[in-house]
Amino acid sequence: MLLVGDIGATKTILSIISPDLGPRKSLAEMTFVSKRYSSLEAIIREFLAETEFTISQAVFGVSGPVVNGRAEITNLPWIVEEAHVKDAFGLENVELLNDLEAIASAIPFLEPDELHTLNAGTPVAEAAIAVIAPGTGLGEAYLTWDGQRYRAHACEGGHTDFGPTNTIQMELLDYLLQEYDHVSYERVCSGMGLPNIYRFLRDTGRAAEPAWLSEKLEEAGDWTPIIVNSARSNEVDCDLCGMTLEIFIDILGAEAGNLALKTMATAGVYLAGGIPPRILPQLQRDRFLTAFTNKGRFDDLLEIMPVHVVLHSRCALLGAACHILRD
């Protein structure tokens, strides 16, 4: 049996699969609150104690860069090492993947109903594929064809310098530079980025903050769901939240286009992560694709690139399973 996992700062999902049943059939699966445990090994130990299976290999998608088989989990005081996990459980092999590498590994195996197409484009067979995933943070990855199959590659593109494309985004950058030494795309295009845009618009007087919303935010630990839900709601009128989401979509479209150009992703661009499915009606409007294709002399190239939203809710876990079964 094979152990696969999606390891994040908020939750850890572990699953046992069999080569005979394929990547989608889980023989046992559990979700754990990551911060309640001192290490990944502690979670694995508890999980295996609840199952009847003996595992031989493991692959984990982890939120953080993987260097020489070692990863420091982002926003969690864990260090995970392939060799340590292998020795602790007597496994034949253990492999760590960056979480976006795991998500990218699932892309070639997604079913049509697990995707929503924003731009059909004209896909080029066996060309590169780009993946951008705004969730708690902003992850990016890409896939290349090796002559027989697609191989996923991790990158940390979400931490590159934020490049404004209009006056209001330039003012947003100037506002955030008063708080941060470095303003990356993750600071403005993720779950942590939406509150930054919101505060900028509120503090610079571009839109008023309603009293009811101020009270909600004061009580909340996470502003992002409130901002997104208020922007999408037909029952409340909140210009501030609506403007926040519009700027977020402009930035997401521009950075998705940047990644598409850098990887020449003529086989497709995929929007993964937790946020895109939640704002699908807004992404279907012209705003996203206008920002995506606004690349001057390369507008025409961007227009032929297919763009899809990934609807699969456990793409990283599926990707880890696909990776271990293919290798």
Image: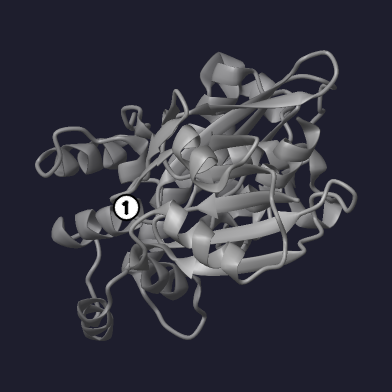
Left of 243 or right of it: where is 95? right
Can the viewer see residue 294 in this picture? no
Q: Position of residue 264 (x, y in %)?
A: 64, 18
| Residue 263 x %, y % | 60, 19
Task: Identify the residue shown where x is 69% and y is 50%.
Answer: 55
Quadrant in the picture for the C terminus:
top right
Q: Describe residue 203's horizontal placement relative to residue 68 as left or right.
A: left
Q: Residue at x 59, y 37 (%)?
A: 94
Give 32 or 175, whichever is nearer the viewer: 32
Q: Amino acid at mark 1?
A: Leu
Instruction: Name the foreground residue: 278 vs 149.
Output: 149
* Above or below 299: residue 111: below
Q: Quadrant of residue 162?
A: top left
Which residue lies most toward the left here? Answer: 178
Please give the count of numbered marks on the rendered protein.
Answer: 1
For label 1, the residue is 76
- Above or below, 312 relative to 297: below
Residue 306 image point, x, y percent:
74, 35
As drawn, the residue found furthest toward the right would be: 20
Does 91 sit above or below residue 304?
A: below
Residue at the (47%, 61%) spot, across then down? 43
In this rendered view, identify the residue nearer to me: 172 or 156. 156
Residue 143 located left or right of residue 213: right
Q: Nearer the viewer, residue 187 or 248?
A: 187
- Colour mapping: one colour
Q: Within 10 angstroms of label 1, few (less than 14), some, or many (20 or more) residues?
A: some
In the structure shown, which secondary structural element does the residue marked by tag 1 occupy?
A: loop
Viewer can see residue 160: yes
Displayed quadrant of residue 107? top right
